[in-house]
Amino acid sequence: MEFFDLAFIWAGLIAFAVLVYVILDGFDLGIGILFPLAKSEKERDIMMNSVAPVWDGNETWLILGGGGLFAVFPLAYAVVMPALYMPITLMLLALVFRGVAFEYRWKTKRWKGFWSAAFFGGSLVATFCQGIALGALVQGIEIEQRSYAGGWFDWLTLFSLFCGAALVVGYALLGATWINMKTEGPLQERNRKLAGPLGVATLALIGVVSTLTPFQDPVYYERWFTLPAAFWSYLVPVFLILISYFLFSGLAKNKDYQPFFMANALFIVCFIGIGISFYPHIVPPSLTIDAAAAPDSSLLFALIGAGLLIPIILIYTAYAYWVFRGKIDENAGYH
């Protein structure tokens, strides 16, 4: 059966790793995007402290997704990397610079402003480049004879830039709802109020991207507007309306957890929609999961390793969040 096909299982694992990365690192990057809106260095310290115990662990899932693609879908990796060299390279450099800022900002007084700006810049650039890469992938990558056949700047289009801007707003929403959940006082209140307009903007951008996506490729259009997949086209607005209701009602009622989980639910619905658009392709519009997969022996060998490691990663990630649950102590420091 298809569901027991090794290539299909691995496609699901990589999709899962990417989704977990978006959920976990999205609010992390969102805090960096919101950094300039803090009123003082003390507030910026609190914002950074709220993710200090977990930020580097969150990026484990990006490594798992990228490394998994290289190991089990080498053809897809060989096609995607030349097509997206620039945004992916900029994203990785931004993440490195942001990680350095995490450490150096606490070690210096004279250059603290510089490293605060670096934390903001690294978060913004990394998020924007992730959105551009996603938009370029949705548009489709030109392939001839199992190799990338496009130009250096095929990724640079109005659609991909718009996706980059949309992801920046979406991650900012995640960051605002995270700060609302983890802090108290004026910082929490401002971010709770900020989450409202960010939520409206995120929903508007989701609507625009969702409207434009079916026109990026005839396959998308056919899939979204022909049965049985067309049922999802009717369910998406219903899900978004329900999630939006709980998001905004949670903000209005000063809930701590509800807005954050509902903001993440928006991303989960969008991610499922992208999966429906892509399947059975791993690199649209022509490279399928089966065609890009490594030999079954390699897939099985890697799956055994993943079967051992992924539960361990899930356990230590859950444990870290459990240990550092609750509100952040504003007098705590990052060490």
Image (cartoon, helix red, strand yellow):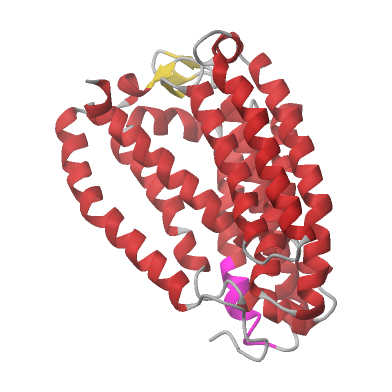
Q: Is residue 104 magenta?
A: yes
Residue 294 seen anywhere in this rendered image of the structure: no
Total count of labels: 0
Q: Is residue 67 left or right of residue 284?
A: left
The residue lying toward the viewer, choosing from 39 and 158, is 39
Instruction: Note whether 178 is above or below 84 in the view shown.
Output: below
Per the picture, the main secondary structure of the magenta-coloured stretch is helix
Q: Is residue 28 magenta?
A: no
- Residue depicted at 33% across the width and 64% down the height: 315
Q: Position of residue 157 (x, y in %)?
A: 72, 27
Q: Is residue 67 left or right of residue 230?
A: left
Location of residue 210 (image quadrant):
top right
Q: Magenta segment range?
A: 99-108
- Residue depicted at 69% across the width and 76% down the height: 183
Residue 29 seen anywhere in this rendered image of the structure: yes
Q: Position of residue 99 (x, y in %)?
A: 56, 68
Instruction: Note whether 54 is above or below 241 in the view shown.
Output: below
Q: Looking at the figure, which quarter contains the N terminus?
A: top left
- Residue depicted at 36% across the width and 23% down the height: 289
- Residue depicted at 55% across the width and 41% down the height: 268
Q: Position of residue 34 (x, y in %)?
A: 76, 63
Q: Position of residue 326 (x, y in %)?
A: 56, 77
The residue lying toward the viewer, choosing from 17 and 178, is 178
Instruction: Note whether 191 is above or below 241 in the view shown.
Output: below
Q: What is the residue that sits farthest to the bottom in this orientation?
A: 331
